[in-house]
Image (cartoon, grey):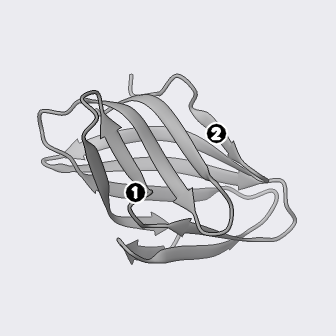
Amino acid sequence: NSNPINPIQVDGEVTWEFKKCVRKETNVDCSFVLTTTNDRLRYGLNLNDETKMTDRQGREYFVNYANFVDIKGNKGTNLIHEIQKGSTYNVSIDFTVPVSVTELNSLIVKMVWSGLVKFNNVTIS
């Protein structure tokens, strides 16, 4: 089971639902579904070093690239999408993580204008 202890995290008017983190060799792809209570909101993911995973030993792994619905961006970019109430939005974030790492202490996604979401105790499947 790859669900963290709290699979739902809220950032202001946006709810993040953790789906899974799946390994493909040294790449780990984590997927989420976003919803909002706002009628219309410009929302941005910040793919900097604050978007990261930390393993049980405290080692950090940083984002390679991410997809926010139909927009793809590499590390160092912002992914900005307009979201609205009544729809769901898929996000996937890719990290490079050694094959020996199967559990994460935390997974943090940083936003452009608002705060961040943090998922604790994530298992990589």
Q: How many labels does the image show?
A: 2
Alpha-carbon neighbours of circle 1 within 10 Å: few (<14), some, or many (≥20)? Answer: many
Q: Name the residue under label 2.
A: 9
Q: What residue type is labelled 1?
A: Ile
Residue placed at 60% from the left, 69% from the top?
Answer: 112
10 lies above or below 49? above
* Residue sitting nearer the eye, 57 or 93: 57
- Report x, y in % for residue 49: 38, 61
Residue furthest toward the front? 58
Q: In this view, does 124 lie above or below 61?
A: above
15 lies above or below 85: above
**Residue 102 left/right relative to 33:** left
Name the side, left or right, on which 42 lies relative to 39.
Answer: left
Give how far apart the Cα atoms at labels 2 and 1 are.
16 Å
Asked which quadrant contains residue 125, the reply is top left
Q: For residue 122, what is the image quadrant?
A: top left
Q: Which residue is drawn at 40% across and 57% down?
A: 93
For this rendering, which residue is in front, 65 or 31?
Answer: 65
Which x, y percent locates residue 101?
Answer: 19, 33
Is disc 1 placed on a helix, strand or loop? Answer: strand
Kindly identify the residue that appears in the image at 51 percent across and 36 percent down: 119
Q: Where is residue 53 in the image (x, y as percent from the top left)?
A: 35, 44
Q: Which of 111 and 123 is in front in this view?
A: 111
SS of the residue at dot 2? strand
Q: Mark 1 points at which residue?
A: 93
Q: In this view, does 123 lie to the left or right of 70?
A: left
